[in-house]
Structure formats: C-alpha cells, structure tokens
Image: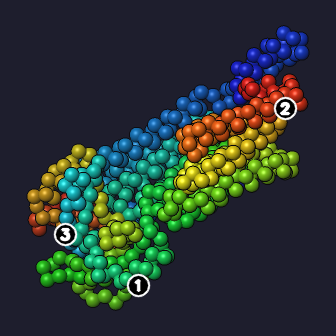
Amino acid sequence: MMRRFLTPTVAILLSGLVMTGALAWLVIDRIALLSSGREIVLAIRPVDPRDLFKGDYVRLAFDVSEIDKALLPDDETRRGERRFGPGATIPLYVVIERQPDESWKPVAVSETQPSGLSANRVFLKGKTQWHSRRRVLYGIERYYVQEGTGLALENLARTSKLAAIVAVGRDGSTAIKGLVVDGRRVYDEPLL
Amino acid sequence: MYRSQNRLLDDVARWQASGWVTPEGASAIRNEIAARRSGIGLAGVLATLAAVLLSFGVMSFVAANWQVMPKLWRLAVIALGLWTALGGAIWLDRRGHPYFSNSALLAGSGIFGAGIMLIAQMYHMDGHPPDAVLLWASGTVLMGLLTRSNAVLAAALALFTLWSQMESFGYGLRQGPHWAFLLAWTTVAAGVAITRWRPGMHLLAITLSLWIIQLAYTGHLHGRAASGHLLVTLIGLTLVGASVGFGPVIDRWRQISGPLFAYGFFIAFVGSLGLQFVADHRGTLTLPLGALTLLAIIGVLVWAWRSDNRAGIWLAYAAFSIEIFSLYVKKIGTMLGTSAFFLVTGLLLAGLAWAAFRLHGKTLQIVEEPR
C-alpha cells in the first residue's frame, strides 16, 4: 500500500470544501449576472400549447429565437457545414436591436463575439443545431415552476401577452429575471 | 478462483471425506472463508443502497421545486445535507467502519449533484445539460481520488459515462469520437490503480469497451459506414492478439491477459456484427463475413478452453448463438442458401469435434459442460 498523503479526515474535508465551493461559484455567477447584467424584455410566443407544460417546467420560445434566413450568409453556411457537419451544435452570437415598439429583433448573426454596438443593440450568446439553424437556443428556454403549477402559467400564456425579463451579461450570457404578463411584472425572481 | 464460497465449502467437505484434507485443515479453511465473508458483508451492501436511496430522495425534493421555502433556505438544506454526509463519513471512519464511511461519501456525492440541479432550476438555467453532469462527475472523481473510496470512484465513472453519452447522442450528434471521455476515464483509472480494486478494473474495461464500440456509431452516418465497424473489429482483434501473443509478459506485469482476451473478443465480435448486419445492407458479403466470424468464434472457443478462460468460453458460446441467429434472420441469399450454409458448417463442426475427441478424448467433455 502506498503511503497516504492525506489522512481520511483531511481528504473528506478537502473534497467537501471543493464541492461547496463549486456550488457557491454557480450561485455567485448567477447573482452577478442577474444583478449587473443589462435588463431587456423579450416577447414570448407559445411553443405548442400542448407541449408548453412539460413536467415541472414551462417551455419558452422567444420572438428572437427565430432567425431570418437572410441573416445567415450562404458562404458562411457552407463554411460552417464543412467545419461542424450536419447535426452538430454550433455556437453563435445574435445581435438584437430595440424597435420603436420596445420589442427586440435579431439584426445580425456572427460566430465571433461582436463589439462596438450602439446603445439600442445588444448581443446574446446562443447555439443552434445544423438541421434547425434558423432556431437559436439561448439557454433560457425553461422556466421551472413548482410541481403541479405549470398549467396556470400555460393558460396565462394562451390568453395574455407574455414576456420575459432577461439579464444579459457582457459576454452575451443570459438569465431569466422574471415574467411580464400584459405589461405587469409577475413571477419576479429573488436573487436568493 | 472460486466465485461461490458455498461451492468451496462443498469441495472442502468432499476433500475431507476423500481424506485429502485433515479435519483440522478443513475447519481452518472454513474459518478463513467465514472471516472473508464478513469483510464487505451484507451491512455494507445495504448501506451503499441506502446512500443511493437518500441521494435520490434529495434529488426528488429538488425536482418538486418547493417554493414555500425561500431560495436561501433550499441552498442551506443542500449545504447542510452535504456536510452532514461528509461529517458522518469522518465519524464512521474514525469509529472503524470504512464501508459505512464509503456509503456516507456516496450520499455526499449524490447531494452535490442534487445541489447542481437545484441551482440550475432556481435560476432557470437551460444551457448545456451535459455540463452539469460533468461538474458533478468532476467533484465526485476528486472526492474518490482524495478519499480513495472505491464506491465513489465507481459513481464518478458512471457519471462520466452518462456525460459522454449525453455529449455524443443527446445534445447534437458529434462529428467525431468524444475524446474528452478518455481523459476522464484515465482519471478514474488512476484512482482504481491506487486502490487496486479488481471489480473497478472491470468497470473501467466495460466503459472503455462501450466507448470503442461507439466509435462506429458517432457522426452523422449512424453506423452505416463500414469503416467504423472495421476499426472497432480491428481494435478488438488487436487486444485479442496482444493477449494471445504476449500473455505471459502481460501477466508478469498484472494478471490481466485473460480479461484482456475476453474484452478484446467482445469488442471484435460487436464490431463484426456491425460490419455484417448494420453496414452491409445489400447482403453481398454476408456469406464470407459470416463464415469468417463463425471460424473466428470457434478459434476463440478453442483458445479460451485451452487457457482455462471461463469468461472467454461463455462469451464465445453467446457470440456463436447470436451469430447463427442473426444469419438465420438475415438469410444468406435465399432460405435454401441459408439452410445449405448451416448444414455445411454444422457438418464441418461435427468433423472438428470428432478430430478433437480423437486428439484429447477426455478434455472434450469439459468443453461440453463448462461450469
């Protein structure tokens, strides 16, 4: 048997500290994004009324999830295809612009992080799959609710205008801060 | 190597009756067996299962997303659970219960995973789910390496395998092999090498075999390309060849040439199944490939029997059955052709059996009924 560098007690304490640290880091990262990220309100569209409530979360689709095909240049498409292959997940950045009616619309797509955007523009980090490359996922497509309460939100989505308040970080990462129903802020998310 | 201690006890009684073992010797052997049995014991196994149940209990609590409890409290419950499990592990270890201590560590790893899920849920994170499993596995393997706990290392390997499966098939098909899994696998292997845990080596071999077999199915072709299956078959044959050619050299390092042969054969056979029944659609190569595979299986059977490799013998029997059943279902040209193929190979095999009987009459009976 090899000599032990650590006593069992020290080894267990050390692994506990690392695990606690990892969990704390996850929380701190989210709190930083939610409290310091730029706040935007994105319109939600029902994915499929029957499919909206799945288990204990509600599926969200946003107007900015659909990318106009014209925004994907043909050259880039072909270049991407060779690099990633069909079915591969492709990371990308979507630049969205605030419209006069306060809604947001995608205006550009790029594979590198955009810079020097005007004040009415912001970029979101997302990913898309090759066969569905007009649909972009931002990692905010699930809204978790308490077990058995998804149906109420689902009905709300069908009868009212639903939007999500989203915090956007400097690197384009996103987090849901709360939901807006008919212009009224509901489901506000506390940081802790 | 005895798999069943009851069978060993029967043998001891028989040897004593035959006068090969003195009554004192027999009772000494029985005492030794009884002492070995209490080593892990039923209690340790039950404690491990309890740890798994507790982890799932915590994960279900998380999934219920109980919003009566504020976020901070939910986080506190997870932290408290984690440190209770780890504190329990320390306490049990100091009281001289290493198996219970291991179970408590396993529960700690489960609660760590539940904590990751809880945080993802609290902040509605839906980024890249395999990343969450990777974080869970990384924390667990670190715990396994630091504490040298076999149960925790096994859990880490299971989590890394789940992560690799999710990356390869669940979230966008990968173009190529998932190389990162090999790095994770090596980390767990380092831990198992330190603890010298034999079942852990089998877990490592099984997961690596599955990874190798999947080489044929990754990418957008989903296993339709023959090249992937050929690669898998060749890797398996290389392992078999290494075991056959350098068995004594390998065994001088570690006693693994037998398992190496069995796992290599398993990989090669699954690869050849892919080559015959997944890639080759038109059936033009069914006859030569089928004949070659059956011949190889018989070769493996002979070698496994001669080297007393039980796993090899059983795998060869299973492979033989699967192969002929698959050929029967797929057919060689027509049903008549299939019939002719089975008749000819059956007669050839019968001739082989007769030749073997003439050469080593006694030994054939053992092949007929391996235990």
- The image quadrant of residue A68 is bottom left
Question: What is the CA distance from the residue labelled 3 to the residue labelled 2?
Answer: 80 Å
Q: Dot 1 falls on which chain?
A: A
**Residue B133 visible within the image:** yes
| Image disc number at residue A75 | 1
Q: Amino acid at mark 2?
A: Ala
Observer-nearest of A125 and B30? A125
Q: Residue furthest top?
A: B17
Relative vertical location of residue B211 with respect to residue B96 in this rendering, above or below = below
The residue wearing badge 2 is B355
**Residue at the spot x=43%, y=66% of the render?**
A87
| Residue B225 pos. (x, y %) | 56, 61
Left or right of residue B356, residue A164 in this image: left
**Residue at the spot x=66%, y=39% of the render?**
B341
Q: Amino acid at mark 1?
A: Asp
Q: Dot 3 falls on which chain?
A: A
Question: What is the CA distance from the residue labelled 1 to the residue labelled 2?
Answer: 68 Å
Left or right of residue A87, residue A101 in this image: left
The residue wearing badge 3 is A43
**Residue at the spot x=40%, y=43% of the render?**
B58
Foreground label between 3 and 2: 2
Left or right of residue B223, residue A38 in this image: left
Relative vertical location of residue A115 with respect to residue B5 in this rendering, above or below = below
Foreground label between 1 and 3: 1
**Circle 1 Cα neighbour tier, 10 Å, few/some/many (<14 / 14–19 / ≥20):** few
Element type where label 3 sits in the image? strand
Callout 3 and callout 2 share a chain: no
